[in-house]
Image (cartoon, rainbow, N blue to C red):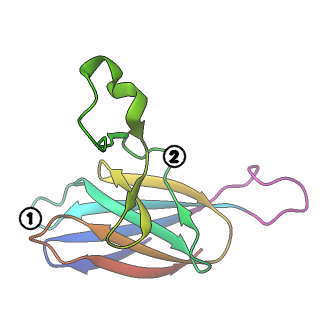
Amino acid sequence: MRKYCFPGFSLVLAMLSALGLAACGEAELTILRIETVDAQTGRPTPARLEVRASDGEAHVASDALRVTLECEVAPPPDWAAWMVQSDRVENPHTGTTQFYSSGTASLVLLPGRYHVRAFKGLEFRVASVEVEV
C-alpha cells in the first residue's frame, strides 16, 4: 500500500493479486484499489478519477458511481433519467475518460504502468501519480 499526500487530500493505492481471474497462460491480473482520503477528517471522500495505461487506454472502476449525463438540448424527463446514466464521463477539456468514486474504487488491471489522476474540486490541486501494477 502506498500513500501519496496532496494539499487537502491524499491518494492511497493498494494492489492485490487477482489469482483465478486470468485464464490459463494469460498474464496475471491485479486489483488496484484507490482510496481518496480527506486530509482533515482522515475519511474517504468522493472524487473524480482517471486511470490510463501507458498506451493511453482508459480504465473505469467496476464500482464507479453512475452519473446522469447532460442532454444536448434539454435535460431528460424524470422518467427517462435511467436511460442516460453512465459509469464514465468523456472530459472534453482533457480528451480523457474519467469516472466518479465515492471515496474508494477497485479496478482489475493487467501488469503494466498506469497514470492515476484524482480531481477533488476547483479548490484542490489535481493529484497525479504513476504506478506500476
User: Which secondary structure class fits the magenta region best?
Assistant: loop
Left or right of 41 in this view: 5: right
Residue at horizontal 51 percent and vertical 46 percent from the top: 62
**Boundaries of the magenta span:** 16-28
Left or right of 30 in this view: 14: left
Position of 116 relative to 65 (above/below): below
Q: Position of residue 107 (x, y in %)?
A: 53, 56
Give the structural element (helix, strand or loop) at label 1. loop
Instruction: Give the CA distance from mark 1 to mark 2.
Output: 28 Å
Tell me the quadrant of the picture where the N terminus can be found. bottom left
**Three-letter code for the amino acid on which mark 1 is drawn:** Gln
Give the structural element (helix, strand or loop) at label 2. loop
Q: Position of residue 98 (x, y in %)?
A: 40, 60
Q: Residue furthest top?
A: 79
Residue at horizontal 91 percent and vertical 62 percent from the top: 25
- Is residue 95 rendered magenta in the image? no
N-term mark: 1 or 2: 1
**Three-letter code for the amino acid on which mark 2 is drawn:** Ser
Residue at horizontal 29 percent and vertical 77 percent from the top: 127
Which residue is at the front of the view, 71 or 112?
71
Residue 62's disc is 2
Q: Which residue is mark 1?
A: 40
